[in-house]
Amino acid sequence: MSDDLDELYQQVILDHCKTPRNFRVLEGANRKGEGYNPLCGDNYTVFMKMDGDVVKDITFQGSGCCISKASASLLTDSVKGKSKSEVKELFKKVHDMMTTGHVDDEGVGKLAVFAGVHKFPARVKCAILSWHAAVAAVDGQDGPVSTENESN
Ligand code: ZN
């Protein structure tokens, strides 16, 4: 089991887990998305400053496992400067990659480090959590999202 996890916890993931980027509350944020993964206890808030359709700035706060934190960190790096439709397109590619292991070289860039999670279904929920929160934020939805089930 730990061998498999070693494979999963690659260097990039560990780096972003230990030193998450954009890990703060965003002053002047006009969008917010919350994600909670009850299976693992991951709980994050994604803050966005959107100018029209474009994500001008994005940060996150919260706590959870290494995979969820590294994923949120890489998400903020990847989503900044993108339009709403680009964020949703990237989400689809990332979701596809995390669930099937198929990497779209054109689109996902360094997010490819998460391709390995498809072998660990419980970890997919950790890795995709912040993406659900980010999509909720660009859509301007209120209320928390969960990787378990949607409720309101
Ligand atoms: Zn987790």
Image: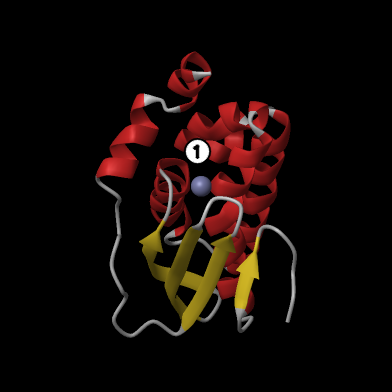
The percent coordinates of residue 84 (x first, y second) are: 60, 68
Residue at image location 66% in from the left, 58% down from the top = 147
The percent coordinates of residue 89 (x first, y second) are: 67, 53
Instruction: Give the tally of numbered discs.
Output: 1
Q: Is residue 82 above or below residue 45?
A: above
Of residues 15 and 77, the one nearer the viewer is: 15
Q: Residue furthest left?
A: 19
Residue at image location 39% in from the left, 35% down from the top = 13
As helix, strand or loop, the secondary structure at mark 1 comes to helix
The percent coordinates of residue 48 (x first, y second) are: 43, 74
Residue at image location 63% in from the left, 31% down from the top = 120
Residue type marked 1: Leu
Q: Quadrant of residue 46?
A: bottom left
Q: Is residue 100 left or right of residue 63?
A: right
Q: Is residue 99 above or below residue 128?
A: above
Residue at image location 56% in from the left, 74% down from the top = 137
Q: Is residue 23 left or right of residue 1?
A: left
Mark 1: give few (<14), some (14-19) or many (20+) Cα within 10 Å. Answer: many
Of residues 5 and 28, the one nearer the viewer is: 5
Q: Is residue 68 left or right of residue 24?
A: right
Q: Residue furthest top?
A: 3
Q: Quadrant of the C terminus?
A: bottom right
The residue beneath circle 1 is 111
